Amino acid sequence: MFLVALAAQIAVGVENARRSERERATIDRMAELWNEPIVALAEAVLAHAAGDLEQAGERLAASIARGREQGSHRLAARAESTALDLGLSLPD
């Protein structure tokens, strides 16, 4: 039973990574940046789960910066909160 649950969690993680990649490709292709803070936040969480703490911090910093630029202060605050929850230091 444990292996079935583990396999299910891995499948969810893989699907989330694919979804994040598709969203990033859409942002890059369409240059519609309204959802970039959310996508960068998702990328950060996925990077953290994969053990890439540097990438996670960079993506959180990007989420915060874009959120502030867009006036999406709650999204920026959410990214800051996520950094604290994950125990990450944000790059300067």
Image (cartoon, grey):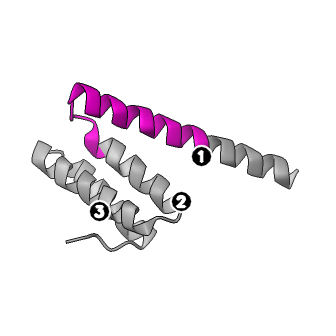
The residue at the point 22 percent across, 34 percent down is 34
The residue at the point 42 percent across, 73 percent down is 87
Which residue is label 2 attached to?
49
In the picture, measured across the screen, residue 32 lies left or right of residue 10, that is left
Helix, strand or loop at mark 2: helix
Please name the amino acid that badge 1 sits on: Gly
The residue at the point 33 percent across, 48 percent down is 40
For the record, the magenta segment spans: 14-37
Q: Foreground mark, 2 or 3?
A: 2
Choose top left, top right, bottom left or bottom right for residue 65: bottom left
Which residue is label 1 attached to?
13
Could you tell me what secondary structure mostly forms the magenta stretch? helix
Residues at marks 3 and 1, CA–CA distance in whole angstroms: 23 Å
Residue 46 vs 82, above or below: the answer is above
Q: Foreground mark, 3 or 1?
A: 1
Q: Earlier in the sequence, mark 2 or mark 3?
A: 2
- How far across and how far down the image is residue 51, in percent? 52, 65
Pick the front one: 81 or 35: 35
